[in-house]
Amino acid sequence: MVTMGGFRKSLISIVLAAGLLACLLNACAPAGTADETKTGSKYIIGVSQANMREEWRIALIDELKEAADSEEDIQIITADATGSVSKQVQDIDNLINYGSDLIIISPVDEKKMASKIKEIYNKDVPVIVMDRAVEGFDYTLYIGPDNQVVGRQAGDYVANRLGDNGGRVVALSSKSMSIQGTERMAGFLGTMEENSQINVESLYMESESKDAAYDLICASKEKVERADIIFAYSDNVALGVCDALRDSGLEGTVQVVDCDGFKGEDEGMDLVKEGRLLATVSCPIGGNEAFDYAKSILKNESGVPKQVILRSTLITVGNINEALGQMDANYEDHGQTIDVGFSQPGKESNWRLANIKSVSESARAFNINLHMEYADQSQAKQFEAIRGFIDEGVDVIIVSPVVGDGWEGILTQAKDAGIPVIMSDRDVTIEGEDESLRTTYIGADFMEEGRRAMQWLRDNVPAKGKALKIMELKGNAGAKPTLERGQGFRNILNQTPGYEIEYSDYGDFTFEGGREVVSQYLDENEWDIDIIYAHNDDMALGAIEELKARGIMPDQKVTVISVDATKAAFESMVAGELSCSVECNPIIGDQLMKAVRDLVAGKKMPYKIITEEKVYDQSVAESLIKSREY
C-alpha cells in the first residue's frame, strides 16, 4: 500500500487533497510512497526507484526529498518497483496519472525499460534517467556515475599503495551482485590485471549485505590474514568487513578500500575518518544534481545537457575534511562579469564555425567576457594561447584540443595559477589520471556517435550474402573524435556479421581530405566499396564529389554515412547523395556558459556533461532542413 511520508516530519491532513491522495493510495503499486502534500505546489516530480533495498537508493530518495523540502512549489512523489519491470511500468503510469510534471526513473532493467521511457518522452513528459543509461537518447537527461571508472580509481590507489613489490589483495564479490557492483568490480580487476606483481583472490558472499560480508571474512580468516588489502565495492559491504576484522583481531593489520563514500554514521566517509577504512572512492548519489536540473527543465531554462556523468573522488584521511567541506558548501552566482579564454583548434569546418557562433552569442547572454584564439590545428599554438590567458589572469580557460595527448605540462601551469580549465567538444587523456587538471568535459559522446552510425547501417543497409565492404574516412590522427568514433563504430560492427572495414585512412576532418582519400583509392583500385563511413560531414561531402567526378553515384553504388548533421549534410541528403548523418551538436554555448558560471560560483562540476544529439537520414531531411541552425 502507498503510505504517506514527509521528509521526516509528521503527516498533515489536508481535506482538499484527500480525494487525490486516496486515489493514489488505491491505484499505485503497493510499495510506493507519496510525500506530504504541499499547499500551493506548482510542480509534481514523480520518482520511480528500481528498488529500495540498496543503501544508495534510499540515500538518493533522501537527497531528493531534502532538496525539495526547501522548495515550496515542488512536491516529490516516490514509488518502489521492488525489482520488478512490470511493477515499474505500472508505477510510472500511476505517477503520470497523478499529475507528475516530470518523472525521475532509476530503471530496474535498462534494456527492458527503454521502450517505456521512450514512450513517455515522446508524449512530452520530461524524463530524467538515473544510474543505468538506456540505449539511444530518448529521454530528457541522464545522470549517473561511470562505475567502471569508480572501480579503476580504487584499483589505481591499491596498486600505488602496494608499490613495485606488489602484494596480496582480496576482492569481495556476491553471487547476486548489482549492476553497479559488477561494473565497479570489472574496473577494479581490470586495473589489477595490469599489475602482475599483485595477487588477487576473489571471495564470494551469499548476498550484498553487511552480515554476509562479516560472515565471509570470519569464515575465511586464514586467507584474509595473508592479505594486504581487502576491496569492498560498497559502504555496506565494507562495514561488515571492518567489523569482522576488528572481531578477528586483524584490524590495522589488513587494510580495507571501498566505493560509495556516503556521509553518515558507519558510512564510508565516517569509516575513513575513524581510520577503519584506508580509502573510499566517493561516488555522488546524484539527487541534488537531479533536483537542480529538474527545476531548470520545469522552468524551461537554457543550458540543460543530455547526459551528466558524475565525478567520483578518492577520499583518504589526508583529504577527507576538505571533501566534507565541499559536500556541505553552498554556491551562489553573484552575477559578476567573468573573463574566459577559449582556445579553439581552428575554423576547419562548418561545424566549427557554428560552434564558434554559438559560444560567442551565449557568452554575451551570460555576461561573460570571451577571448577566443584559433590554433590552426597546432597544439603548440594552443599552448601559447593558454600561456597568454594565464598571463591575462582570466577566471576560466576553455580548450577544444587539437589532439588528446600531451597536455599535462600546460594544464599544470594553469592549475598552479589557480585557473580552472574546461574541455569543450574534445577531451584530453591525462597521464597519471590527475583529473584535477581539468574540471569537466562538455560536448559530444563520440563513442556513442560511432555506435549510432553502425546501428543505422545494421538496421537500414542489411548485409545479404556477401560481406559489405566499408571505407572509413578518419579525422585527425590522435584526436578524440577520431579515436572514439572509430572505436564506437567497431563496437557494433564486431557484434554484427556481414560487414568489414576494407580500407581506412585519415582525411583530417576536411572536404579536401575526404576527397583525396577516395581519389587515392580509385587511382590504385577498382571501386569495390559498398559503404563509406566518414567521421564528419565535410569529409563525406568531399568523398561524394570525388565519386561523382569518377562516375560513381552515391546512394546508388555506395552508401555514405557521416557524423555532424550540418545543414550542408541535410542538403546532400535531400539531393539523394548522403544517406545518413549522426548529429554532433555544435550549439552548446548555453550549456558551456552555464557551466562556467556554476564553476565560478563554487559548484562542484561533474566529470562529463554530454550534449543532446539525434540521427537523421533521407527520410526526414527535407522536412527538417529549414529548421537547421548550422
Image (tube, helix red, strand yellow):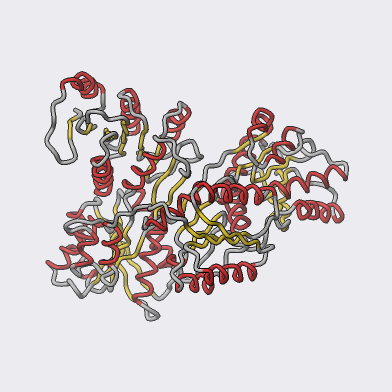
245 versus 292 height, above or below: below
In what quadrant of the picture does the N terminus appear?
top left
Question: Is 351 or 220 nearer to us in this picture?
Answer: 351
The residue depicted at 46 percent of the width and 43 percent of the height is 304
Residue furthest to the top: 19
Q: In this view, does 289 lie to the left or right of 430?
A: left
Q: Is residue 495 visible?
A: no
Q: In which quarter of the image is residue 606?
A: bottom left
Q: Which residue sits furthest front?
A: 336
Q: Nearer the viewer, residue 468 or 553?
A: 553
Quarter the C terminus occupies? top right
Report x, y in % for residue 483: 60, 58
Which picture quadrant has residue 276? bottom left
Observer able to see residue 488: yes
**In the image: residue 528, left or right of residue 308:** right
Residue 86 coordinates in the image, percent (x, y): 34, 29
Q: Which residue lies furthest to the bottom in this view?
A: 165
